[in-house]
Image (cartoon, helix red, strand yellow):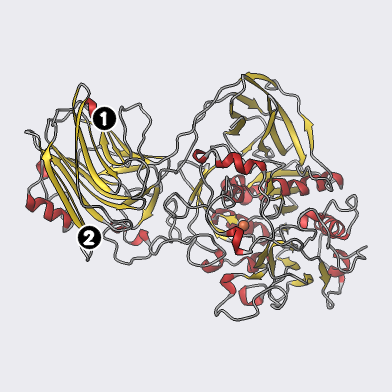
């Protein structure tokens, strides 16, 4: 990558500081703090708008290349020195037997330095040991393992060098294999045991990462007898098998919310998980329990992936001390090196104890993370042929992302073995989190770039606002929201934690006013890693529009234990909260505008539509030429839209790209497409809430892309302004 970087956090408060990490192939780079107002650079848009912010960090810095090391594993430091004899047992569920390099299951020190390594190579188990001084030998099993099945695996070397490896699958038809021979059996110094990777020295980088699940690894100071190995296959506990020889017995899934795991041998050799492998996954004993919290003893496995990444761990290049009086907004470190430039965005939130405006804008950073480094356009998901997209036009950054698999994946991507990705980290270069990034699916800005449409419009219309993020809301709760007369959402607030929903509900219950100007909001249950808050977790459940789904028994989050999937299926439908819920999505060439509901009359309709003349309104805009496009939501009493919600306008004329969302389809029938199905639409809704609170929903991702049309003089802009003014000024709703 010629020039890129990331910030320590996505949000920072005035008076605090945030560090920036940069990598460049150039000898030096320039950095300047800027405030961002508009990202879209395309010809019909108002253009890129940023303003300089004087700062001591503005200047030139030495360039350097910073490396990223992906791949998860488990490390157990503090292993005592051992004699020449040892044995290993573990349960293994491999998912990529066809793999270009060795995948290490368990290793201790460099093999040629007196260590050992039990690997899978070409689908076969291989045990390597060394006598030090560069001498090493290996023993391989001729029979191959089976992808996607649990195997009991054993490897042992006697003091005299007699070695044995064996495996067998747990279930019928049994596949098994073994090998015996002679291997060096040297004594080893104290050190670190690595699980799912090779670790040549305690301070080395793990290599040879394994894809698949491992459960119950145990290390013994002597080889095991036939009876002892059979007992292990049958599930005997640590008390019953070679108790006196047990060095360590690890429950990798002992603490799924954290990155540590317990030693059950009584020797206190607890371990640490590196790069956040997936926990709360079923192990070899799993019995069909669907919630790991009720049966944790069946969830002692961890799912390792060679492409997991929790934190790129780059070194800091500069630290920005944010002035205490800096206005809240969207800022960036604007980097330049050679002929390249990049913007690393950072939200400057309001001070932690007060608001500085009456309007609060919530930037959907959990959605940004869910889509972070999304590789759907490059991966074999079949989108090009599926017809979902009218056209796919990758941003140039897509190709650069393809050159950097180590920058990690999004919650829309699959790991190398085809399993869905359920964690996403903010601490890495996120190439699509850029103000001028255009998403290949709609050939226009989405996420940050699209959210800046609103930032720009608020300024053009003279509204003062504070800006904060999902992370701020998650941690500050209703105390943050309650300082504002009006909260305005981002364009795609899809990923919500329980804490965020609680806060928003509490805000609305005491008279808060919400403008939901987005599509497919409040959709996926999302949680935050308690020890690494820059990481979010989801499970895709078994319904909803999704590119992968959770495996049976793995619907509950590791980090919180809560059931994942759609909020609707946990009784918290968006319809009840904001009057509308997800209806459809479409990525065609055009998106529709809205027609005013024929029966929308009365004081609220008068207020919303004051000065509105277009019929229909909103059939223009910077995203697919229409305000009612991309992902859209509708009012539906069946899913909880309250009876008093007023539908003011609806889209008409969605094309076949829009199909009714899968969670609304009980039985597949003809007529699910936009041209025929009346449920495929976006409804603009006003809903009064307690104590003169209110929700206004204009639920389409592309709504905000119409705001600047015709020099900001258009009916989408007018309606948005009418509502925002009313939400700021009207004390009591007429009616
Ligand atoms: Fe989405």
Q: Position of residue 219 (x, y in %)?
A: 19, 41
Residue at image position (77%, 62%) is 590
Queried on whether the Cβ of the residue with tag 1 lies below 8 angstroms from ligand 1, the answer reads no
Q: Residue at x 57, y 70 (%)?
A: 662
Residue drawn at point x = 91 percent, y = 64 percent: 612
- Label for residue 109? 1
The answer to whether residue 163 is visible is no
Compared with residue 21, is residue 222 higher up or lower down, i.e. above or below? below
State yes or no: discs 1 and 2 in contact (Cβ < 8 Å).
no
**What residue is drawn where x is 41% and y is 62%?**
551
**Viewer-side residue, 596 vs 445:** 445
Q: Is residue 672 left or right of residue 517?
A: left
In which quadrant of the rendered image does the N terminus lie? top right
**Would you name the residue on which mark 2 appears?**
170
Residue 538: horizontal and vertical position, in percent? Answer: 50, 55
For the C terminus, the image quarter is bottom right
Which badge, 1 or 2, comes first in the chain's sequence? 1
Residue 433, image x, y percentages: 64, 42
């Amino acid at each position: 990558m010629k020039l890129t970087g990331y910030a320590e956090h996505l949000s920072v408060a005035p008076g605090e500081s945030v560090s920036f990490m940069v990598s460049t192939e150039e000898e030096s780079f320039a950095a300047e703090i800027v405030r961002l107002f508009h990202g879209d650079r395309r010809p019909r848009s108002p253009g890129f708008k940023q303003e300089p912010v004087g700062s001591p960090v503005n200047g030139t810095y030495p360039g350097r290349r910073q490396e990223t090391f992906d791949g998860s594993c488990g490390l157990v430091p503090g292993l005592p020195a051992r004699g020449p004899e040892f044995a290993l047992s573990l349960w293994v569920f491999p998912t990529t037997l066809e793999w270009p390099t060795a995948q290490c299951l368990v290793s201790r020190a460099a093999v040629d330095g007196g260590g050992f390594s039990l690997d899978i190579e070409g689908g076969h188990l291989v045990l390597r040991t060394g006598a030090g001084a560069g001498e090493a030998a290996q023993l391989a099993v001729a029979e191959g393992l089976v992808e996607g099945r649990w195997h009991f695996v054993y490897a042992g070397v006697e003091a005299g060098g007699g070695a044995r490896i064996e495996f067998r699958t747990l279930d019928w038809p049994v596949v098994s294999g073994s090998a015996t021979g002679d291997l060096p059996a040297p004594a080893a110094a104290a050190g670190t045991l690595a699980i799912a990777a090779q670790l040549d020295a305690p301070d080395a980088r793990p290599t040879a990462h394994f894809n698949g699940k491992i459960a119950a690894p145990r290390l013994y100071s002597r080889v095991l007898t036939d009876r002892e190995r059979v007992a292990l296959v049958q599930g005997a506990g640590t008390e019953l098998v070679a108790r006196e020889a047990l060095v360590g017995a690890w429950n990798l899934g002992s603490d799924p919310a954290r990155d540590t795991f317990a030693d059950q041998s009584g020797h206190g050799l607890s371990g640490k998980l590196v790069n956040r492998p997936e926990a709360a996954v079923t192990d070899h004993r799993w019995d069909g329990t669907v919630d790991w919290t009720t049966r944790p003893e069946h969830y002692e496995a961890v799912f390792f992936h060679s492409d997991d990444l929790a934190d790129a761990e780059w070194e800091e290049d500069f630290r920005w001390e944010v002035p205490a009086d800096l206005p809240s907004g969207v800022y960036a470190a604007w980097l330049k090196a050679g002929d390249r430039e990049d913007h690393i965005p950072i939200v400057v939130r309001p001070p932690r104890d007060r608001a500085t405006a009456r309007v609060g804008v919530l930037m959907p950073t959990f959605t940004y993370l869910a889509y972070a480094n999304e590789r759907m356009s490059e991966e074999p998901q079949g989108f090009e042929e599926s017809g979902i997209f009218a056209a796919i036009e990758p941003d140039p950054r897509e190709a650069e992302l393809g050159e950097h698999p180590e920058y990690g994946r999004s919650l829309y991507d699959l790991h190398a073995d085809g399993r869905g990705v359920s964690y996403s980290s903010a601490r890495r270069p996120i190439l699509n989190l850029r103000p001028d990034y255009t998403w290949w699916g709609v050939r226009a800005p989405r996420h940050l770039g699209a959210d800046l449409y609103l930032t720009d419009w608020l300024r053009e219309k003279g509204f003062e606002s504070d800006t904060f993020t999902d992370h701020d809301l998650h941690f500050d709760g209703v105390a943050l929201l309650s300082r504002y007369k009006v909260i305005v959402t981002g364009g795609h607030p899809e990923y919500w934690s329980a804490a965020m929903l609680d806060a928003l509900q509490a805000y609305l219950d005491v008279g808060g006013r919400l403008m939901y100007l987005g599509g497919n909001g409040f959709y996926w249950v999302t949680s935050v890693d308690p020890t690494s808050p820059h990481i979010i977790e989801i499970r895709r459940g078994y319904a909803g529009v999704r590119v992968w789904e959770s495996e049976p028994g793995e619907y509950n989050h590791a980090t919180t234990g809560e059931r994942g999937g759609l909020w609707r299926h946990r009784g918290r439908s968006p319809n009840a909260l904001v009057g509308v819920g997800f209806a459809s999505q479409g990525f065609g060439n055009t998106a529709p505008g809205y027609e005013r509901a024929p029966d929308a009359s009365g004081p609220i309709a008068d207020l919303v539509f004051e000065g509105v003349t277009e019929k229909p309104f909103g059939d223009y805009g910077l995203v697919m030429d229409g305000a009612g496009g991309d992902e859209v939501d509708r009012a539906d009493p069946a899913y909880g839209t309250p009876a008093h919600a007023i539908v003011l306008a609806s889209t008409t004329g969605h094309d076949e790209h829009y199909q009714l969302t899968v969670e609304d389809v009980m039985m597949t029938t003809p007529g699910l497409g936009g041209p025929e199905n009346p449920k495929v639409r976006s409804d603009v809704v006003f809903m009064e809430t307690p104590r003169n609170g209110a929700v206004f929903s204009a639920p389409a991702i592309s709504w905000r892309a119409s705001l600047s049309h015709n020099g900001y003089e258009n009916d989408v802009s007018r309606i948005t302004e009418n509502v925002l003014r009313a939400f700021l000024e009207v004390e009591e709703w007429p009616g």
